[in-house]
Image (spheres, grey):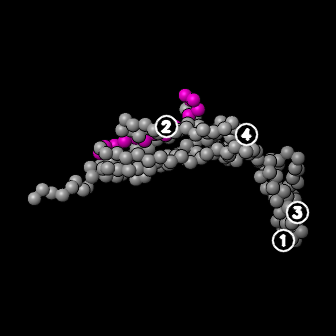
Amino acid sequence: MGAPAGVSLPRLTRARRARYHSSAMKGRNRPRIVTWLAVLAATSCLAAPAAAQGRGRKPSLSLRVTPAVAFTPARVTATAELRNVAQDDESFFCPSVEWEWGDGTQSEESSDCGPFEAGVSQVRTRYTKQNTYHTPGAYRVTVRLKRGKTVLLAASMSITVREGAFQGLPDE
């Protein structure tokens, strides 16, 4: 790992390292090395562009559906979370969101957003929707962030719906 642009670090030769580690030199050299480490840490943080704040990772979409196992009629809440995206990333500003519930039903939502303005517009990172299942079975819930017909990101999760525990009062 090298020094950031514009910062030169002292080169420690084997002899200088040996002197630093000797008990007579520790007190004298330590402040200088700690200062260089502080400079390195500060310049590394300041030099990181806003787009790299996602730690160099690709944008991703996670999905959590609760409860993952339920009884009919089952009302579930699905929460999708956009990760590793800068708040001012225009490509993820105001997408339409398509929910596919696995039971043949779909939901779609799109916001009426104004044009993107750098430094003003912010990316929404959490989307939530509810659905009710009336029939037992295994279902695959899928969420897609879209721009027009292009899918930007998608995520899915499986849930299980069992026959309701309470079927009504028995006949007398």
As measured in the structure, the alpha-carbon distance from the residue carrying label 1 to the one carrying label 3 is: 16 Å
The residue under label 4 is 117
Indicate the secondary structure of the residue bearing disc 1. helix
Magenta stretch: dominant secondary structure: strand
Do residues under tags 1 and 4 come within 8 Å of each other at their CB atoms?
A: no
Residue drawn at the location 81% of the way across and 55% of the way down: 42
The residue under label 1 is 23
In the rendered view, tell whether residue 128 sits above or below residue 99.
below
Question: Residue 24 location in percent, x, y?
Answer: 87, 71
Please rate how many residues cluster around mark 4, counting C-alpha atoms within 10 Å: few if below 14, some from 14 to 19, many from 20: few
Question: Residue 154 location in percent, x, y?
Answer: 52, 38
The residue under label 3 is 32
As measured in the structure, the alpha-carbon distance from the residue carrying label 4 to the one carrying label 2 is: 25 Å
Do residues under tags 2 and 1 come within 8 Å of each other at their CB atoms?
A: no
Mark found first going from the N terminus, 2 or 3: 3
Question: Residue 138 location in percent, x, y?
Answer: 34, 43
Residue drawn at the location 27% of the way across and 52% of the way down: 164
- 105 lies left or right of 6: left
- 12 lies left or right of 45: right
Q: Quadrant of the C terminus?
A: bottom left
- 144 lies left or right of 34: left
Residues in magenta, as a range: 136-150
Q: Is residue 140 magenta?
A: yes
Does the image show residue 10?
A: yes
The circle drawn on residue 108 is 2
Front disc: 2 or 1: 2
Dot 4 amino acid type = Glu
Question: Residue 107 location in percent, x, y?
Answer: 45, 38
